[in-house]
Amino acid sequence: MFIEVKLETMIIIMKSHVTDDEIRAVEKKLESMGMGSNVSRGIERTVIGAIGDERKVDKEALEALTGVEDVIRVMKPYKIVSRESHPEDSVIDIRGVKLGGKQIQIISGPCSVETQSQMDSAAQSVAAAGCRLMRGGAFKPRTSPYTFQGVGVEGLEMFRRAADKHNLPIVTELMDVRMLDTFLEHKVDVIQIGTRNMQNFDLLKEVGRIQTPVILKRGMSATISEWLMAAEYIAAGGNHNIIFCERGVRSFETYYRNMLDVTAVPVLKRETHLPVIIDPSHAGGKSWMVPALARAAVAAGADGLLVEMHPAPADAWCDADQALSPNQLNELMGELRGIARVIGREL
Ligand code: PEP
Ligand code: MN
């Protein structure tokens, strides 16, 4: 849904002592971009209001004109994902599981799919803990090309078999657009776009053409507005089933893997109508930090969590030190249930 904008959507502030020619040049530039203009001459300054759909406007091209001091956007650069365009919270339906409503969803499972028995055991623990969605990567984005890269397509099959026994929708990461059809054939319920791909625009455009819900992780150095614009790429293609996932950002601190930006939760809840979840596992990077970060996330208003859990953490092929055991997941679910109740939500 696009909104027709007839307001002044951009304000061009001219330098003092601007000439008529410089003003005309701005008007002509706006006209070439399909925009109208409205010149207001003050005593000290002249400002020009641009009228029309500012998405067509190349801000830098205006800033480059002589006589232009500053160009200010009035409207947000993202539209479909913005709360301005959709004041109510969006609730994403994942095969009957609602994400973004009163009920908080805890998505749990191993970092990576390893074997059928590992996935069977993990699915059993995820369901027993009361989680309604399961995670697991068949394709892993690893820093080193010499470490385990994921079991691949076979992993999708193992995941599907294990999760189906408990009727758990599956969440798994898509790294390469060439695997999209395979993901659709395996009826992947939620496609995860990882931190390293948040600005892989070709990948974003492709997942924008389908209707499968997408978890868009925050790039590890991405600003909130870059993250919102990445979501807008998906939404602009027609897929509005987007879930934001904060997973910690790069910082000066080396004690933990990433710095969990809990502030992003209230900020995103204000800026967008889409659900916001938190991944405490990749933030802390150690299993003992996960419960505290998970509790903070729920208390801050997150709509869900993405938590790594492995049937035998010490044997995990990937991210062993941050995986909860089935018992630890169970215990955490109990704590989160209490917090949810206090803030008028449920688990
Ligand atoms: C993951 O969830 O397994 C993962 C690789 O996360 P991130 O993209 O946040 O590093
Ligand atoms: Mn992991």
Image (tube, grey):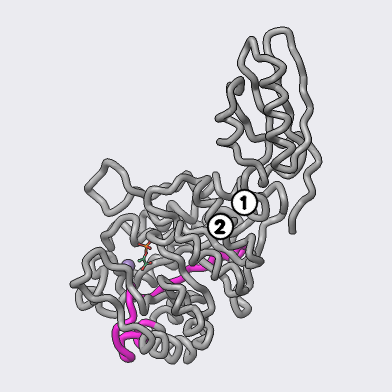
Residue that sits furthest to the front in the current view? 21
Query: Where is mark 2, residue-wise?
Result: 231
The answer to whether residue 347 is seen in the rendering is: no
- Seen in the image, is 173 located left or right of residue 98? left
Residue shown at 59% from the left, 37% from the top? 59
Q: Residue 320: horizontal and vertical position, in percent?
A: 24, 70
Q: Is mark 2 within 8 Å of ligand 1?
A: no
Judge by depth and name the residue closer to the eye, 111 or 210: 210
Q: Amino acid at mark 1?
A: Thr
Q: Residues within 10 Å of mark 2 (few under 14, many from 20)?
A: many
Quadrant, the C terminus: bottom right
Q: Is mark 1 within 8 Å of ligand 1?
A: no
Q: Earlier in the sequence, mark 1 or mark 2?
A: 2
Q: Which residues are magenta?
A: 100-122
Above or below — where is 241 with respect to 292? below
Above or below — where is 91 with respect to 171? above
Residue shown at 31% from the left, 51% from the top? 258
Q: Are marks 1 and 2 in contact (CB under 8 Å)?
A: yes
Q: Residue 119: horizontal and vertical position, in percent?
A: 35, 85
Helix, strand or loop at mark 1: loop
Q: Amino acid at mark 2?
A: Ala
Residue shown at 68% from the left, 39% from the top? 75
